[in-house]
Structure formats: structure tokens, C-alpha cells
Image: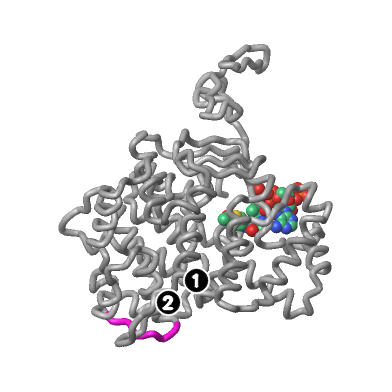
Amino acid sequence: MISIVNFDINGCSYKLPVVYGTNYYEKAINISKLRENTGFITFDPGLKNTGITKSSISFIDGEKGELLYRGYPIEQIISKCTFIETSYLLLNGELPNTAQLKSFSENINKFNSISQEIYKILDKIPMSYHPMGILSSLTCLLPTAYTKNSIKEKDMYFNLLAKLPILAALTYRKKVGLPISYSDYEDLNYNLDYTSNLLKMFFSVPKKYYKRNTILTDALDKLLILHADHEQNCSTTTVRLLGSVHANLFSSVSAGISALWGRLHGGANQAVIEMLENILKSGGNIKKWVERAKDKKDSFRLMGFGHRIYKNFDPRARIVKKVAENVLSELGITDPILELAKELEEVVLKEPYFMEKKLYPNIDFYSGIIYQAMGIPKDMFTVMFALGRLPGWMAHWKEMRLNQEPIGRPRQIYIGYKKRNIH
Ligand code: ACO
């Protein structure tokens, strides 16, 4: 293993140290002193070749299609853990024992309410506004309810795990015309497990017994786990950047939610369903849409395909596909969108364009089909993604603060006017 990289610039020799990850093939040239020593910076649009931190939270091998949370393969986490155990693992580094899990859940429950002020703001927001904008704005406002007493750091994590689902559920209820009132949502917080409670907050009807649906609860728990972390993606990097300037956790997560909203990131789950519906509406001619995606002159892309890191199957996509098939078959739903999605996947995987560029279905390709079966409106799919990604965002924020990482502030190569005068 080499520990130093030598290079020459204008006849001068320089040495740069090499940094290795747990897996020896993950290696980086440490350029942190490059500008100081040589006057040069690196140029890497899209940060495709830039490691911004050392992290021990999750690991992706994009070539193999492997994802680990704190060392555990995602396939094992999915079959052996709940979302709340996964959240504990991501935040604390190890899986909880029974007592730790109980205390973690009790701590979340302690914060299972929102202030009157936040509730009143939500009540005034027109429901034509996008739920991701609502979630991001209200998350940012949450700590204003605590102006008198600042929130302890450990309580911030419990607070967000408790309050984000409430904000999402209240938005949903208001959107679909289910009654909400300050006291109603408090009534909704029964002594259920996290994911059952989440579904109950969304779908329960006052004065009517809410019957827990194990198929949907299990499917949602799995989706939350699959979304829980994915190393330095755009929204997580955003959260870390905010943390680097000591923005509080709430505003950092709020910025993460806004980043996730992008259609090339988490917003793709909504875009996928809209795309599949358009394909169906226009006669279901898959070939025509695939040709459009290949055409460089056409801005259309097949949503739900491709990934910055995975150059093989996204392991989460395989699991989501199975969950979608199970949920629909167990609920006895025949969804033409699922059939179309499977057909499209089959066609795409045989297309040389997609094979050469190593474009495979990503997590967003099938997840919307499950949300749809649950009764979640399309414009709230990305909200569900955010609820899942929350522990990952918080674990990264915590890690970067513990490591006392410097302010995230890249440089640029200026190509504008040279200095000039106003005449
Ligand atoms: N359809 C058609 N062509 C595609 C697609 C696609 N879905 N994705 C990538 N390509 C092509 C690009 O046109 C480009 O071609 P070129 O090299 O001839 O110019 C090549 O593949 C590489 O694409 P980039 O955009 O450079 O790759 P990058 O790593 O920057 O982007 C991304 C990855 C944004 C996910 C991209 O694949 C995409 O836009 N996919 C569709 C949106 C999507 O599903 N996003 C969800 C990602 S998962 C997540 O964030 C949770």
C-alpha cells in the first residue's frame, strides 16, 4: 500500500499523503495542504472525486452493489431490525440491547407533541403548498418554541424523531380533509411502536377504532430503514455543511429536507410515478420513452434509473421491488403501474445505452408504488423519504460536530470579468 503520492508541477516535486478507508481499495490523496504548498487547488465539478470527510456511519460499494450500516449489510438489517433499532444504530454506533431500546423509545415519546404556535402556523398554510416546503419550513421553526430554555443536544435527536412524523401526519390530514386540532393529534399518540403510531397519526379517524395493518406497518418500517442513511449524498452533505457553521440541528435538517426535495434526489420518487402515469396515459409505448431517454437532444431522463455511486444494482431497489410485490399481492391490489414498472425495468436492463452507462433502477423506482398502495398522496412521497432519512442526517451532523470538522467552504475558479471601472 502506498502512503505517499509524488507529483511534479513546473519542475518542483511534491509529496501528498494517502488516506485509506477500512477497505483498503478505498483510497484518497490528501490535498488539504495543496494550495498552501503549490498555489494550486483541485477542480472537481459535482464533487465526483472528492471525499469531504472520514465517516464510520454507512458504507457503499457501488461496483458490487453493497450497502452497510455501521458494518451490517442492509439485507440483514432489513430482516432483523426495526426502523427505531436502525435509528439507534446509526446515531450511537451499535444496536441497542432491550433496556437501551426501551429508554430510546421512551425518550422519543416524551417529545411526542408540537407547540400551539407551530400548530397554528400549520393551520394557516394553504394546502396548495408542497408538503416538502411545509415540512422544511416547520422543522426550521421548531426550536423557536424553546426560546426560553435551550434544548440539550441529546434531546434534539429525540425531538426530531418525535416531531417530524407529527408534522408530516398533520400536513396529510389537513390536505385530505381529515380533522385536525391541537388536541386531536395528541389523542393520536397512543402507546404503539414508532411506525404503527406514524400510520395511525396519518390515517386514524376520530371516535373510530384504528385497526393496525401489519402488512402496511411492516412495509413502511422497511422503507424507512432502507432510506435511513446513504453516506455523503446531496441532502446529507447539506446537513453536514450547515452543521459545520454551527447551525442548529433543526435548521440543518430543514436544509436537508429542501435538498432532498430535488427531482434528481429524493424528489425522484414522486417523479417516477408521474412518469409511469404519463407512459400509461400515452398508450404504454415503453420503447418510445426509452428512446427519448437515450436522445441527447431531449432533456427527458428515465426517473428512478441511475445513481452517482451505484454502477450495479442498488441493493435497496431489489428489496423495495419485493416489498412492493408483497404489499400489493397481500392487499389484493392489481396495480397497472407496478406491471408497467416491471416491464420498463426489463426493457431498460437489456438496452445497450443503459448497460454501457451502468444505469440500474434505484431506490426511488418502486417506492412510490408502495406509498400509493398505503394511500399516501404523490406529493408526500418525498416526505416519507425524509422521515426515513432523518436518523442518517442526524448521525452525520453528530459525527461532524464530534470530529470538530472545519467549515465546509469550497473554492472556485473565477471566469468572470477582470477588475474594471464603472464609467
Ligand atoms: N436516464 C437517461 N440517461 C441517464 C440517466 C437516466 N435516468 N441517468 C444518467 N443518464 C446518463 C446521462 O445522460 C449521462 O450521459 P452522458 O455520459 O452521455 O452525458 C450519464 O448517464 C451519466 O449521468 P450523470 O447525470 O452524469 O450521472 P450522475 O452521477 O451525475 O447522476 C443521477 C446520477 C442524478 C441519479 C442520474 O442518474 C439521474 O438523473 N437519474 C434520474 C433521477 C433519479 O432517479 N434520481 C434518484 C437518485 S437516487 C436518490 O437520490 C435517492
Q: Secondary structure at mark 2?
A: helix
Can you see residue 162? yes
* Residue 188 vs residue 287, the one in the foreground: 188
Q: Amino acid at mark 1?
A: Met
Residue drawn at (49%, 61%), measured in percent from left and top?
A: 385
Tell me which segment is drawn in magenta.
176-181
- Horizontally, residue 42 falls left or right of residue 346, namely left
Q: Are marks 1 and 2 in contact (CB under 8 Å)?
A: yes
- Horizontally, residue 257 falls left or right of residue 346, namely left
Q: Main secondary structure of the magenta part?
A: loop
Q: Position of residue 309 (x, y in %)?
A: 62, 44
Residue drawn at (52%, 44%), measured in percent from left and top?
A: 73
The quarter of the displayed image where residue 335 is located: bottom right
Q: Position of residue 3 (x, y in %)?
A: 56, 16
Residue under numbered circle 2: 172
| Mark 1 neighbour class, 10 Å CA radius: few under 14, some 14 to 19, many 20 or more | many
Q: Position of residue 109 (x, y in %)?
A: 26, 62
User: How far apart, in angstroms, are the residues tagged by discs 1 and 2?
Assistant: 8 Å
Let me know if residue 177 is in the magenta part: yes
Can you see residue 156? no
Q: Secondary structure at mark 1?
A: helix
Residue under numbered circle 1: 380
